[in-house]
Amino acid sequence: NINGSSNSSKKIPTSSSSKLKQKGGKLGDAFAVLGILQGTDTNSGEETYLDNAVQTILKNVMDLILTPILDSFISNHKNRDNQSSHSSDLKSSNQHEPKWHFFESNTGNTEDDDNFVSSLEWKLSVDNDTFVATTANNNTTTLEQQHVWCDVLRTIETVLTFVYKSVFFQRPELSSRLGRYLYFEDSNSNSVDDNSQRLSTDTSSTSLTVELRPNYIRGPLLDRLLKLCWDMCIPSCSELTTNTTGWELTTKFIQAATLEFEKSLLSKSIIVQKELEQASNSDPVVAVGPLSSFVSNLEEQYAEKKRVDVLTKGRAILFTDYHNTVMVGGNNGKNSNNNNVSATTSSNQDDKDTTEGLFMKDFNNIDPTHLGPDMDPNPMSIYVLPRCAISNVAYNLIEHVKSTLNEATTSSTNNENNNDSTSANSKMLATTLYKASRELLDLFRAIIPTTQGNVTSTIPRCAAILHNDCVYISHILHSLGLKYRERMPPPLDKLCTFVDMIPPFRELADTVLCDMVERQKLQLADIVFDRCEGLQLSLKLNEGGKVWSEAETGVRGAHYHLQQLSQAWKENILPSEVYCRAMGSLIDTLLSLLLDPVMKAEDISESASHFVSSLYRSALNTRDILPTVGDGSGSDVEKDKLARSSCAYWERFAAVGSFMDMSLIDVANGLANGTFRTLTGAELSRLLMATFDDSEKRKRLLAALAD
């Protein structure tokens, strides 16, 4: 039957009315018969007819009665939170908490009368005297949470009491089944899976895992109550740090109400417990069941909820667009002509956030004129983060880590002079938030390489950004623990550090960039190798024809490829020194591909010598992709100097190119001047024999090289 009413003129949604009938005790007789049919073996672990009948009744009670009622509380709680977030300046609202009123009635003369009916009806009404949702700065919110939770428990207790009295006739064997199916069950019984060790329930945006006694498994009603308690009774804001007295009163009120609720269930045999622990005067709240066990330490649950909120926000940051970047760092190298210390968002950072800011004050009075010509006037320059681009994801994550640590230190500082219990709770919160800040960094290493693995392995710019992110995070972690250590509670005031997390980030940075450099080397080999495949044999000819033309095409293609790669890395993406090392390694790949056929040639004609010299000069033009040095004028001398320091094969390659245009006299002078110091005597002898005809001058040079 459907029945509902409201004492308000407003249109209020109503729930069902359940009429559970017992005709002349026939329902009781039916339970007795089903109990007889199940036999004496009650520990077989198999469901009986009685179990099936009770489950059917309780499923209807849960689906048709308890679920709609609990949904009304949850829906109202969400609406109030939304209104509070959109109307933070309002002192009150017109939203009221739901009030469920129950009416139990009996019709008929006696329970033996076939017309005897026990009825439970309920209605949803609005009471103008109910508590009003207000802003988070008002103490009414805390008081409201207490009474709403009590209303929830009182409502559930009313329904379960009616089922216990009027449906199961106060029979312990039936009410115990009610507890097992709706509330919780001991996993030591043979009817449940022994592997169920935890009680879990979904909390929309997060997964709430509540560890209760090792042998508890959940029921649908307990699931819903835990979810409501997690959302409603545990604050999301920093209430512990701003109003410790109000929070302690709220905690005691909620614990007492929950304990009374489960004691009521225990008295009805819904909760079966062999021994009920008696509360002492010093500890008035003792857990009877899983729900009272959950609320017995709301401070710990509050800390866990803060941790979940921190990690949820961090996860949301990590899944934002990874391609947007921000400039960080300062000028730390003589290869860059940009003297800005910081740029964009990073310019607003506190100087104390960096290692330089922590230690630079001791070196401010150094006179630069007392330094040598090769010394940097900034003695702390080795600790300065080079100017580079990082993703907004990494920057926002580090800011989130800092805000989490700030909250941890704030909670500890605000409660230094409070009682021992409050101080212990603050220490627990600070420890939890410190661990959460470390877990945020672990989330970065777990999520970003997975979600961005495809682009970072194929797109050079994305690989460079991930490399920079890891370098930036490593740089911050050097001094992050030092900044917050003094404000942490013991023992974190000595143990707060992030230095141990630096090696994994450095390893990730090296792996990502080195893998991309190796990929680019393979692409250069594809461009050059096939086109220079016949170059060695063609050098004996006076006209190379197509082979020489293909070699020139290969060099131009490699130069173009390096220029495109330079556009992805050079414009303030990679740090200057890292860029030079990466591009120098790629240039070495091109130079080695061109050196091998010439060094292995047995006969090189005069025309081929001039062609090789011209080809090598074209390849040496790749120095243009390296950044300018000194005053930024970019002269050839400066470019060659940077190329020699960045490329291992540069001097060797240039020496062979110069050799191809030299006479024997020029070669002899070059030996005296050290032009060929990067070539061994055997290599230079081989070139002499392949390039020049036999003569007395050649013999003297070969003899000199042999000596």
Image (cartoon, grey):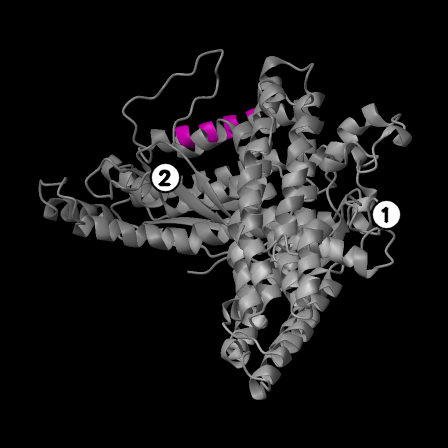
Q: Which residue is mark 1?
A: 339
- 651 relative to 439, above or below: below
Name the mark nearer the viewer: 1 or 2.
1
Residue ID at (59%, 32%): 499
Residue ID at (14%, 39%): 43
Q: Which residue is mark 2?
A: 198
Residue ID at (63%, 40%): 474
Instruction: Kindly state the secondary structure of the residue where label 1 is placed.
Output: loop
Residue 368: x and y, percent?
88, 32
Mark 2, other Cα within 10 Å: few <14 / some 14–19 / many ≥20:
some
Q: Amino acid at mark 2?
A: Arg
Front residue (pair 172, 576): 576
The N terminus - image quarter: bottom left
Of label 1 and label 2, which has the lower sequence position? 2
Q: Amino acid at mark 1?
A: Asn
Q: Which residues are magenta?
A: 252-263
Main secondary structure of the magenta stretch: helix
Front residue (pair 53, 539): 539
